[in-house]
Image (cartoon, rainbow, N blue to C red):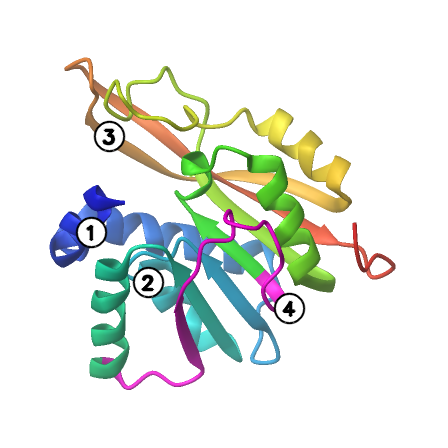
């Protein structure tokens, strides 16, 4: 948390993050029929880079994060651009693992690998999505543990097939994945490596309401 707070003011100055958000948004729009009738929720929004690329195609977007500093930067951007149909909240769904609102589209970018109990959080997302709504998760493909520093306490990316199986277990269907972006950087072992970022798409059946 403190790390993200300290990086908030310079977060958007990293071109790679801007390009990643743009690429993920393009892939989401490719696979999800986004429209001005849809309400959306982004979890782990940071400074809102992804939602800023999707906002104009949606009815409304709620952006949530647990970093006050990131959200302060986001509020400033929203005010400067005069965006409407936007709600911002400091929200930690892992405190109680209870749903918070209902939406047609829920999405995250590079947030899930920070969550210890992934299945519980995905279950909460399931409850928050309206029948026939969509869940889009953009995150690291399974990696060797060098994307982060050695003391990182999260997941070293995700095996796409295993994540798809988990989504099916929770009741999602129409699951598909696509590589959206490749992050090339110096890894924690000092070697420059490329880390793929995939987007996995899934849909809640129109006949399912809770799980």
Residue drawn 26% across and 68% down? 74
Judged from the image, the secondary structure of the residue bearing numbered disc 2 is loop
Q: Residues within 10 Å of mark 2 (few under 14, many from 20)?
A: many
Rendered location of residue 102, percent (x, y) = 64, 68
Kindly report which numbered mark, 1 or 4, lies closer to the viewer in this rendering: 1
Residue placed under numbered mark 2 in the picture: 48
Q: What separation in Å lies between label 1 and label 4 (alpha carbons)?
A: 28 Å
| Horizontal side of residue 112 vs 35, given as left or right | left
Q: What separation in Å lies between label 2 and label 3 (alpha carbons)?
A: 22 Å
Q: Residues within 10 Å of mark 4 (few under 14, many from 20)?
A: some
Residue placed under numbered mark 1 in the picture: 5
Q: What separation in Å lies between label 4 and label 2 (alpha carbons)?
A: 20 Å
Q: Which mark is residue 102?
A: 4
Kindly report which numbered mark, 1 or 3, lies closer to the viewer in this rendering: 1
Direction front: furthest residue: 96
Residue drawn 23% across and 47% down? 4
Q: What separation in Å lies between label 2 and label 1 (alpha carbons)?
A: 14 Å
Residue placed under numbered mark 3 in the picture: 184
Q: Earlier in the sequence, mark 2 or mark 1?
A: 1
**In magenta segment, residue 87:** yes
Q: Which mark is residue 171?
A: none
Q: Specify the principal SS of the magenta part.
A: loop
Which contiguous range is marked in magenta? 81-105
Kindly report which numbered mark, 4 or 2, lies closer to the viewer in this rendering: 4
Q: Residues within 10 Å of mark 1 (few under 14, many from 20)?
A: some
Residue drawn 56% across and 80% down? 36
- Judge whether 142 appears above or below 54 on screen: above
Rendered location of residue 112, percent (x, y) = 46, 40
Rendered location of residue 139, percent (x, y) = 44, 38
Judged from the image, the secondary structure of the residue bearing numbered disc 4 is loop
């Amino acid at each position: 948390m403190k790390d993200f707070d300290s990086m908030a003011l310079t977060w958007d100055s990293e071109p790679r993050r801007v390009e990643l958000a743009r690429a993920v948004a393009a892939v989401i729009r490719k696979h999800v029929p986004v429209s001005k009738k849809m309400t959306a929720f982004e979890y782990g929004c940071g400074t809102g880079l992804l939602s800023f690329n999707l906002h104009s195609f949606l009815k409304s977007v709620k952006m949530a994060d647990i970093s006050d500093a990131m959200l302060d930067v986001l509020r400033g951007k929203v005010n400067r651009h005069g965006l409407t149909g936007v709600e911002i909240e400091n929200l930690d769904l892992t405190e109680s693992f209870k749903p918070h609102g209902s939406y047609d589209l829920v999405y995250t970018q590079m947030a899930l690998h920070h969550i210890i109990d992934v299945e519980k959080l995905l279950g909460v997302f399931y409850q928050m999505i309206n029948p026939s709504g969509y869940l889009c998760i953009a995150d690291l493909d399974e990696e060797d543990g060098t994307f982060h520093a050695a003391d990182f306490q999260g997941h070293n990316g995700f095996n796409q097939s295993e994540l798809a199986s988990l989504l099916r277990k929770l009741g999602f269907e129409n699951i598909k994945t696509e590589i959206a972006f490749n992050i090339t950087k110096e890894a924690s072992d000092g070697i420059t490596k490329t880390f793929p970022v995939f987007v996995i798409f899934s849909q809640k059946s129109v006949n399912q309401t809770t799980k």
